[in-house]
Amino acid sequence: MSMYDDVEKILYSKESIQKRLQAVAKEMNALYSDADLPLLICNLKGAFMFLADLVRYLDFRHELDFIETSSYGAGTASSGDVRFLLDVGESITDRNVIIVEDIVDSGVTLSCILERFEARHARSVRVAALLNKPSRREIEVPIDFCGFVVPNEFVIGYGLDYDQQYRNLPFIGVLKPAVYQGS
Ligand code: PRP
């Protein structure tokens, strides 16, 4: 059976994602045109595809780095225990940092990342999130650049996984409940 059989519905097609990313990039280009070499920090793994497409629409000079956090395990709800599996390779002191996230759900992950980077005295920290799911928020967090506000459904594809699968779907869709029921 194909992984496509596990998709209940498509929320955003690959074309609508690209269109929205161009609009988000336009906002970022306007804000960072004169900034002092911003550092984009991609939170792996979920944000890899968002980052790869987004940067192709950016026209300001910047640097890239990666972090990896993990909080979900194989379940569908955050464990609340955020682990940093990979940290940035260079100092962020006095840097203009842009965190690139795939989804802000409870806000726990982003809140931990922001706390960590603010303690390291970044000059500014902003957040670009592909998806915002405000209905599940537990901690208030800022999102400066947002792709889509999503309903409270289990979303997969375009980087987002269930049990480490489905990240390669070219669209953002909803997973059939039958796939994760009992997990
Ligand atoms: C997901 C997602 C965000 C976080 C959002 O990461 O990529 O980082 O959860 O959830 P929250 O707002 O409730 O904290 P996950 O831990 O599943 O790792 P992954 O990106 O490798 O899939």
Image: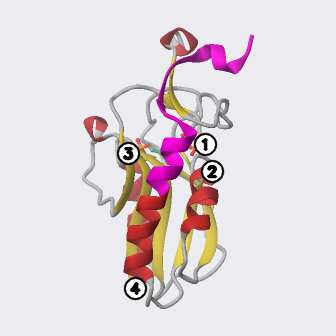
Question: Callout 3 environment at 10 Å: few (<14), some (14 to 19), or many (20+)?
Answer: some
For residue 50, the mark is: none
Q: Nearer the viewer, residue 97 or 82?
A: 97
Residue 163 shown left or right of residue 17 in the figure: right
Q: Determine whether the residue tagged by mark 3 lies in a helix, strand or loop.
A: strand
**Decide: marks 4, 1 in contact (CB < 8 A)?**
no
Type of amino acid at the residue the image marks with label 2: Met
Q: Residue at x 42, y 71 (%)?
A: 28
Please tell me whether residue 163 belongs to the stretch shown in magenta: no
| Relative height, residue 25 to residue 150 (above, below) | below
Question: Callout 1 environment at 10 Å: few (<14), some (14 to 19), or many (20+)?
Answer: many
Q: Determine whether the residue tagged by mark 4 lies in a helix, strand or loop.
A: loop
User: Which residue is denoted by mark 1 in the rendering?
Assistant: 159
Question: Callout 4 environment at 10 Å: few (<14), some (14 to 19), or many (20+)?
Answer: some
Ligand 1 within 8 Å, label 1 CB: yes
Residue 62 shown left or right of residue 114 in the figure: right
The numbered mark, 4 or 1, whose residue comes first in the sequence reads 4
User: Which residue is denoted by mark 3 in the rendering?
Assistant: 148
Q: Nearer the viewer, residue 85 or 171?
A: 171
The numbered mark, 1 or 3, whose residue comes first in the sequence reads 3
The answer for how far apart the CA atoms under marks 3 and 2 are is: 15 Å
Percent of width and height locating residue 146: 37, 55
Q: Residue at x 54, y 43 (%)?
A: 15
Q: Nearer the viewer, residue 105 or 55?
A: 55
Question: Callout 2 environment at 10 Å: few (<14), some (14 to 19), or many (20+)?
Answer: some
For residue 123, the mark is: 4
Q: Determine whether the residue tagged by mark 1 lies in a helix, strand or loop.
A: loop
Type of amino acid at the residue the image marks with label 3: Phe
The answer for how far apart the CA atoms under marks 1 and 2 are is: 5 Å
The numbered mark, 3 or 4, whose residue comes first in the sequence reads 4
Dot in front, 1 or 3: 3
